[in-house]
Amino acid sequence: MSRSFLLLCSSFCTALLAPWTAASAQQVGPFRSERFDENWSGVGDDAPFGAALKNIDLGHDVRLSLGGDARWRFSWLDAPRLGLGGVQEDAWVLQRLLAHADLRFGDNARVFVQLGAHDGVSREIASSTDDDTLDLQQAFIDLHKKVGSADVTLRLGRQELVLGPRFASARDSGNVRQRHDMARVIITGGDWRFDAFGGRPTEVNRGAFDDEPDPNQRFYGARMQHKTRDTTLEISAYRLDRDAVTLAGVTAPDDRTSYGAHAFGRRGSIDFDAEAVFQSGAFGGDDIRAFGAALDLGRTFTETPMTPRINLRLTYGSGDSAAGDGKQETFAPVFPNSSWFGQNGLASFSNTIETAGMIAITPRENVTLTAKLAAVWRADTNDFLYAGNTALANTSGGDEAFTGVSPSLSLVWRPNANITINPYVSYVVLSDEVRDRGAHNVTYAHLTIGLRF
């Protein structure tokens, strides 16, 4: 564990010391994954379908924007939870339908409302976020005030909150995106931004308009962001208190504080994204001491046919070294984005070391083909293998940390700005030791169709 930990820390620090340019996480076009962040004021004649429904002038400096999203995902998996979950094959459909209205009163106030309807069909091992009949996905008000040279926004209500692409995300790979009933203060000025927030994650209940703040969870914290010409730097501290969590085969209250640093940027053809999080707190009667980090280094060959991009990924999440020693060392990010590893839902940031190489090509302007080859180890052999938040039975102990390798292939085709089509396939080749425990090699495939306006 220590050698892998030091290797990843060394790579992470090397990346932070390099000079980079503009943020690599920028999205192209007017659409954003967080729809409330969209700005349609400068869209020209090449605007995508639906632009006529944006910035509708209602008079008296009041403007209305309307929009919507639809996503269908058809998935097949021949060995859920590596074949250790009692189900040998699963095929299912996830449907997500969203519609929103964004009403702005000049620069002073705003009301944002988004409705959602979610369905999961025929899934053998269902997720708690598969189904949610018509409900409020988001509903918040913004109150704006200019204070000196800073812009201050108070946001109240149900809202999505993304603190990074991996460890505190909206969990878009699931069906119902993560949201919170909370109060949030946003202060921006020049190249600086500060966010402070507090509230509860929102429960997913299957009835109509019955989602409520989760009484068993509390989430609060702050983030500071600074942009330079070359790099975006973020530091954050946030706490998630949960009444019951299962880690390393033990269920207990989990009061976990995460201290994070995130940096991303681009210089010419080189881009990078690096993040590290240290966790402390209490898990039952144990002290939490956990660490996770990820590094993505890439280069794009802009003068080469099909504009290939190659990149290297390193990911680390600590595991628990010994039960009953008074310490809980399993890294458990608060709202993780599991699609960082791929789309099959078989990986986790807990007790994980992953090294991966990727290459993406653009044979046409609106088509991207990405191939990935990853190798995975347990960070500590005394802890379990995890699939998402679930510890897989009979996977702790043993002498072999190596878990397996996984090639995957993803194609993203955007016929226009409103439509995305994504076929994806992956295969997991497990180590002999993992297969000896009853697991199976795994094939996964899906077809995702997304529409937005």
Image (spheres, rainbow, N blue to C red):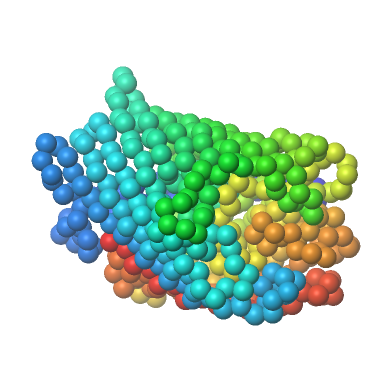
Whether residue 226 sits left or right of residue 255 in the image: it is left
Whether residue 315 sits left or right of residue 323 in the image: it is left
Position of residue 50 measured from the top left corner of the image (x, y, whole percent): 22, 61
**Residue 7 shows in the view:** no
Position of residue 363 measured from the top left corner of the image (x, y, whole percent): 39, 75
- Depth check: give the residue in front, 319 or 15: 319
Position of residue 277 measured from the top left corner of the image (x, y, whole percent): 63, 42
Residue 328: image quadrant is top right
Q: Extreme top residue here?
A: 148
Residue ID at (65%, 66%): 346
Position of residue 313 measured from the top left corner of the image (x, y, whole percent): 60, 58
Residue ID at (49%, 46%): 212
Name above or below for residue 314 compared with residue 367. above
Whether residue 22 sits left or right of residue 357 in the image: it is left
Residue ID at (48%, 55%): 177
- Depth check: give the residue in front, 104 or 307: 104
Name above or below for residue 312 compared with residue 185. below
Residue ID at (71%, 36%): 280
Whether residue 9 sits left or right of residue 328 in the image: it is left
Quadrant assignment for the C terminus? bottom left
- Depth check: give the residue in front, 360 or 349: 349
Number of numbered labels in the structure image: 0
Name above or below for residue 85 compared with residue 239. below
**Residue 447 shows in the view:** yes
